[in-house]
Image (cartoon, helix red, strand yellow):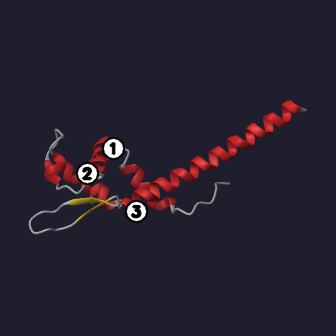
Amino acid sequence: MPAATTTPVVDLDAAFAALGDPVRRALVSRLAHGDATVGELAEPFDLTQQAISHHIGVLRRCGLVEQRREGTRRPCRLRTAQLAQLSTWIDEQRRAWHDRLDALEQHLSDEAAR
């Protein structure tokens, strides 16, 4: 039986899928340093602004990025609360595995002592 979690796994599926792409991970890393427009995000890539817009759209739909209007600019911002949910889920899995490994170690130690 899977361990109960406080994080809704269904909501995380799209975020983990989105982060499976190296361009999107790079965009998230860039946005961790501050807001940027699609044009600014496209600069280091050998991709069109349209391609970067597509990747931003994927990140927006899964809730990792938001985009707002500032006059004619549309800067993108990382949504850190969604990243925190991902981190929480990963930490829960790590704790569960550490608990299992600790129990196995104890079992093996008990067996060796017999």
Please name the amino acid that badge 3 sits on: Ala
Which image quadrant is residue 110 in? top right
Badge 1 or badge 2: first in the primary sequence:
1
Mark closer to the chain start, 3 or 2: 2
Residue corresponding to mark 3? 81
Q: Does 3 appear above or below 43?
A: below
> What residue did someone put label 2 on?
55
Report which residue position mark 1 lands on. Answer: 21
Circle 3 packing at 10 Å, graded few (<14), some (14-19), many (20+), is: few
Identify the residue shown where x is 37% and y is 59%.
80
- Which residue is at 58% across, 60% downward? 5
Closest to the observer, 68 or 51: 68
On the rendered structure, is 99 left or right of 5? right
**Nearer mark to the viewer, of 3 and 1:** 3
Viewer-closest of 38 and 17:
38
Q: Residue furthest right?
A: 114
Circles 1, 2 touching at the beta carbon (< 8 Å) = yes
